[in-house]
Amino acid sequence: MDVSARRFRLGANASQIQASVRRRGIEPLRHLGRVDQLRSIFTFGGLLSRAKMDEEGIAYRMSGWGAEGKAEEMKDYICCSLRPPWGMSWQYPDSKVLILLQRCLLWREGTLFSPTWSSHNSVTLQLLLKNNTAEVFDSMFANRTSSFPSPAPGEILIPHSIELTYFVPQMYFHSENSKASALDSLEGVSLPDGRAVSEAFRFEVSPYQFRGNY
């Protein structure tokens, strides 16, 4: 499955969200993945929702969404965040990788904003779809200029897939061992333009990204 050709379509509130993002100085989004998934991510051309993974017969080994039935309800969305998701990264940090994504995904059609943890029983997909507005996005912050969401990490739900086109060429790892495992797993894997992933991306060790509390 090649997801690289998906067309970028602006969301209904794109101009307001763009203005808010620029005013706040928000830069990359984050997605917490597993080191042992990196090879398949680059082979398939990007991040896939659980629904897309099921279609392709790809084993889903990440955690569920918390509440019973929530993982099924949210299965066609990829969970990202505005800040490092420390609440999810502190356990077994060497098995995880923090992938950086371009901020333009915030105003792509279909992107949803969760002003609180999407795993909470009170947060439903129907509610997020209904309240998918620039006002809800701004409600994730304490004031008009803050870039730090409350509650952190500021969850962003992106449907279907996130193509390699929207990856920032940089990834964070908890340790040198974790970084080495990633590089080993990506040996011989190239981007569509022919560059080796290991040469096109910066692989950085930063325990801070996995520290476990805000």
Image (cartoon, rainbow, N blue to C red):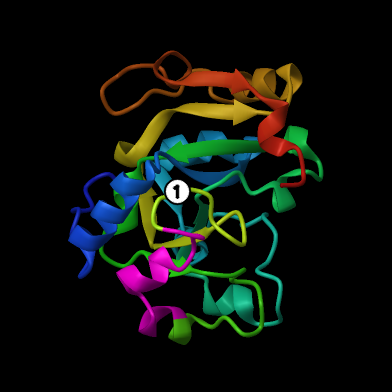
Q: In this view, does 31 lie above or below 62?
A: above
Task: Please tell me which residue lies in front, 123 or 140.
Answer: 140
On the picture, is 198 further left or further right than 60? left
Q: In this view, does 137 lie to the left or right of 38?
A: left
- The residue nearer to you, when weighing 65 against 114, is 114
Q: Give the range drawn in magenta.
A: 128-143
Q: Quadrant of residue 209?
A: top right
Q: Is residue 3 visible?
A: no
User: At 48% from the left edge and 81% from the top edge, which residue is drawn?
Assistant: 125
Between 187 and 7, the one lying in front of the other is 7
Task: Give coordinates of residue 214: x percent, y percent.
Answer: 71, 47
- Element under label 1? strand
Q: What amino acid type should be assigned to the residue bearing mark 1?
A: Leu
Q: From what the image shows, is residue 110 above or below residue 188? A: below
Residue drawn at the location 46% of the way across and 85% of the way down: 127
Q: List the residue tagged with mark 1.
A: 47
